[in-house]
Image (cartoon, coloured by chain):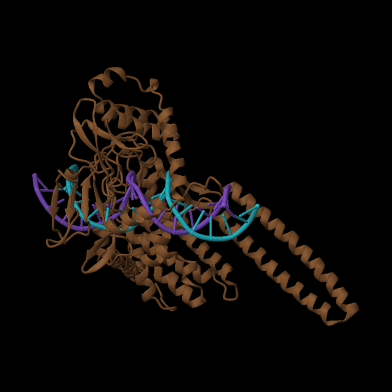
Chain colours: A brown, B cyan, C purple
Amino acid sequence: TARWEEERYKDGVKWQFLEHKGPVFAPPYEALPDHVKFYYDGKHMKLAPAAEEVSTFFGKMLDHDYTTKEVFRKNFFKDWRKEMNSEEKSKITDLKKCDFNEINDYFKAQSEIRKAMSKEQKLVKENERILQEYGFCLMDNHKERIANFRIEPPGLFRGRGDHPKMGMLKRRSRPEDIIINCSKDSKHPKPPPGTKWKEVRHDNKVTWLVSWTENIQGSIKYIMLNPSSRIKGEKDWQKYETARRLKKCVDRIRSQYHEDWKSKEMRIRQRAVALYFIDKLALRAGNEKEEGETADTVGCCSLRVEHINLYPEKDGQEFVVEFDFLGKDSIRYYNKVPVEKRAFKNLQLFMENKATEDDLFDRLNTSILNKHLQELMDGLTAKVFRTYNASITLQQQLKELTSPDENIPAKILSYNRANRAVAILCNHQRAAPKTFEKSMQTLQAKIDAKKDQLSDARRELKSSKADAKVRRDEKSKKTVETRKKAISRIEEQLMRMEVQATDREENKQIALGTSKLNYLDPRISVAWCKKWDIPVEKIYNKTQREKFAWALDMAEDDYEF
DNA sequence: GTGATCACTTAGGATGCGCGAA
DNA sequence: TTCGCGCATCCTAAGTGATCAC
């Protein structure tokens, strides 16, 4: 469907152009010299000197505050300079003097146009066609949905938190960067005309269909199957089965690490205290990271002295450890927890004679820890504790919070509360939605209005009752009945709103999705739904039901994690 | 033991879209 | 019919952990 046109570039070189419709490459292109790129002039994709394309990225991002960050600007300008030709290089020497407002306005206008167009259904149809053509593959004779079938487009790298590489240019992937993985006899997508794939291989030991190396960290990116696929589903099921095996031996492991706190060997004590944190607080393992390559974040094994404070006594509690560090995605973990005395004494020992930037567990890393865990249980690693503790917490909380005589909305609130307990345990946070305050106010106003309505209705009932007493006829009796019904309807509506308000307030800064999708054995939820006769659609949306199809089939109302 | 590489899961924010209220 | 909101989906970064070479 790509429409090709011919145009003339300023050097007198003839190139071909096309409107961008391509699903795999954005846009598709011929083999081009490195300094030549595409840009969009509002009508057509055109060739542009690379520098122009790069600078438009900056314009696109102008609304974000990070374009004011020094690191971002420095990295961006360095990479931009690399893309400039000699004329541009001598002209564009100072980022401060560059004004990107025009291009920024242009992209804002573009997004308005896109919004208007989306109503026309044209784009919707086109997206559907692309999905049908590129969004599926055949695996073991089953048509399976592919998760991320589009190659990542070029742009400026942001990263999360204080990332040292923010602002760098993420380069366009070319067919020559792409490795295709498929079976020998299969039909695989052909590269754009005049180009070649880097490689076509047939490795059935891995699950990816396409891979390429990204230029910011040099890591490998993959195209893989959707969570609804057989291969992902089976893996997911296995994960929860491993966690269930941990349930059987967790007592033994816990008493083991309590013993190890007394060990003569420092490395064993450290291992035991770290495992205690991972188990009790659901901390992540904490692999080492290369300095200067990523934001400075830590997990359990990579905690430094500066990340904890010890209080022999605080707020009436003994042996309190205060954690304050940035974890995955630079999300802050802050927690004050009383710990067992022996663990506390060990921590004091580990911190002796250390500088704040020294490792808390200097005799430990994730590979040592995981080797130890492997000996305790086949397939046990640090992350299994997170899965186990999350799922067992959900199960316990559901038991505790669900009261049999509550109605469905109230039961769902209980479910969300159980889910929330897990999200808090795993520290799954989100930024409070921008519209939070406003939407809370709107809801409160609705509640108030409903309350007024209720008192009006009650007054009306009273008067009609009095009326019925005097008149003693059928008609007035009927009025009383209708008004009674109206009241109970209003009461129910009010209750539902109040439940919703509580739920939303409690959810302000907590993300439930991550735990629901990755940590909670879906069979627990399915069993709960069956037990209390709650439609599973109230808990899992369509996508989630597809992902957890295996669990929907499997779990009965008496399922125990 | 160490570092590099690879494959895979887990993560939050941005964007898209459908639906109910006005 | 329009508007605004909230949930679903998309996107891709950032983790975990296995394996391999030295």
- Residue A235, percent across and down? 28, 65
Return the x and y of residue A539 as percentages of the image width and height: 47, 66
Q: Give the image location of residue A215, x and y in percent.
A: 24, 39
- Residue located 39% across and 51% down the image: A123
State left or right for residue C11 relative to residue A324: left
Counting every numbered tag in the picture gives 0
Q: Quadrant location of residue A105? A: top left
Rendered-image quadrant of the C terminus of chain A = bottom left
Q: Is residue A363 above or below residue A405?
A: above
Q: Residue furthest top?
A: A90
Residue furthest to the front in view is A6
Q: Nearer the viewer, residue A316 or A55?
A: A55
On the rendered structure, is A529 left or right of A73?
Answer: right
How far across and how far down the image is residue A18, in percent?
27, 41
Furthest-right residue in this view:
A470
Residue at 35% across / 57% down in the picture? A128
- Seen from the viewer's position, the closer of residues A319 and A125 is A125
> Can you say whether B15 is above or below A35 in the image?
below
Which residue occupies 39% across, 31% down?
Answer: A59
Which is nearer the eye, A281 or A183? Answer: A183
| Residue A292 in view in this figure | no
Asked whether the viewer can see residue A435, the reply is yes
Task: Pick the residue in front: A481 or A117.
Answer: A117
Residue A142 vs residue A440: left or right? left
Query: Looking at the rendering, which quadrant does residue A485 occupy?
Result: bottom right
Q: Splitting the image into 4 quarters, where does residue A369 fall? A: bottom left
